[in-house]
Image (spheres, rainbow, N blue to C red):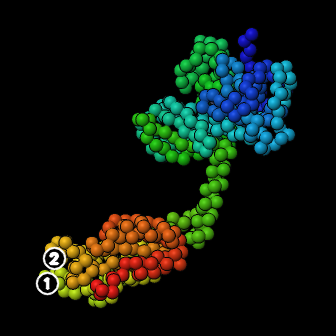
Amino acid sequence: MIMITRKLFQEDVYKKDCISTIAEVHGTGTREDPFLLVLDETVFFPEGGGQPCDLGTIENVPVVNVFEKDGVIFHGLQPLHILEKTDSNSQKNDWKPGDKVSCNLDWKRRFSHMQRHCGEHILSGIFFSECGGVNRGFHMGSDYMTIDIDVQEITWEAAERIEMLTNEAIWANLPVSVRYFDNPSEAEHLPLRKALAIDEDISIVCVGDESNPADCVACCGTHPNTSGQVGLLKILKLENYKGMTRVYFKAGEEALEDYRNKHRILTDLNLKYSSDDNNLLDKIRAQDEKNKEIRQELYLMKNTLKDKAVSEIFNEYGIAAAEPTTKVFSVTETGLLIREYPYFHANDLITITKALTEIYGSSTSSSKRNTAKTSDIGGKNYPLFVLVSTRENTIILASNGAHDCGKIVKDNAHIWRGKGGGNANSARALFPTREDLECYVTFIKQAYRLPEAER
Ligand SMILES: [Zn+2]
């Protein structure tokens, strides 16, 4: 026998619970094969028409999805392994056809869907009557809705006017009627926004009087019986979408939630900027200007400090080479050149090592001459630069041939929990603590200094 589930939500959309008789039991309750109950009648709306399904409980067992197939509504239950973890009282695995079960809707969720869905009707109806745009796609997401209106360009001003007309239709508290027809010809006299796409079991939703409705269209969803219950509708943004306009909006309780959230953010910002809603933007702009000046000042000061750091190193270790524009490094006692800086970031240190090696690089002709023995540039080893940013626990290594910086990091930094890498000329390593960093520097001092004989 083919059975059709009686849809109680079509008879009374406000019915929140019912006692139903189990008609069929499918599944075994496992994760892969959860119980699916077919009931003789149900308050649960299955997914359809862009509206998500209802949730709730059957005999206190959570209903996790509801869908319809050929007029039969299936109620998917929470699998047993999850029930065992959460609430043993609601565990049930002896569903039998003929048993009576108590069904309860998650009414807050359902009513929110009704508000949002009805809001979408009115907004689509008014887009249609005001600019001839037909809604070609509807999406009801968990935190906003979209409709795709087949008009290429809608200005924000036009959208705001339509939003106002929509809210006026909501506040007019118009009746929302649903009428059922067996075939399309019976419904043809209605002022439909869209041509009928189905041949039987037609339900037509009309917001307001049929002679001049805010909306009139075929729909299988659930709607409140007056438009006033939508409460509020707010358009969030417009977007071009495949030659149409995608309209993002919220309605009902979710619009209030959105207002609350935005109000909370504004309140926090006003506190932070000692402002009110009216002068907040001015205060933010003024702060931005100030920040810009500070950044510029900081940039100039940092550059001066970096130049100073470079010349300090050269004054100490740079010596004139054979060519007048060139400098090379004299040997240090150990072949290492270690400097610590409390105020520089690692990236600043890279700029400094670049400046050092670039000036050095102008003597590449002499370095090429010395490629056979790179350790003899300037008479002795070209030093290994070891620059340390103590504020970031980061070390920058730089060399121009005598050392492989990437290898020095790769082989040893991990011993002190350092992370990083690089190439032969330049590498960096970041350490979790100052102590780790200092251990690594001590290691480099011992491992990479020149042997006594070469000093
Ligand atoms: Zn609808």
Q: Is mark 1 within 8 Å of ligand 1?
A: no
Mark yes or no: residue 309 visible.
no
282 vs 18: above or below? below
Q: Where is residue 341 in the image (x, y as percent from the top left)?
A: 42, 82
Image point (84%, 30%), residue name: 102
Q: Where is residue 89 in the image (x, y as percent from the top left)?
A: 85, 40
455 vs 52: above or below? below
Mark yes or no: residue 25 visible.
yes
Image point (67%, 23%), residue name: 68
Snapshot quadrant of residue 354: bottom left
In the rendered structure, find residue 322 and report the number of the disc placed on it: 1
Considering depth in this image, is 380 or 279 the residue closer to the camera? 380
Snapshot quadrant of residue 451: bottom left
Mark 2–mark 1 CB contact (< 8 Å): yes
Image point (86%, 24%), residue name: 100
Return the residue found at the far front: 453
If the image is split into quadrants, where does the C terminus sit?
bottom left
Q: In this view, does 419 lie to the left or right of 47?
A: left
Three-letter amino acid code of the residue under disc 1: Ala
Q: Position of residue 16 (x, y in %)?
A: 80, 33
SS assignment at label 2:
helix
SS assignment at label 1:
loop
Question: Residues under labels 2 and 1: Cα distance?
Answer: 9 Å
Q: Mark 2 Cα within 10 Å, few/some/many (few <14, many 20+)?
A: some
> Which residue in the protein does label 2 denote?
366
Return the residue found at the far top: 1
Considering depth in this image, is 1 or 199 the residue closer to the camera? 1
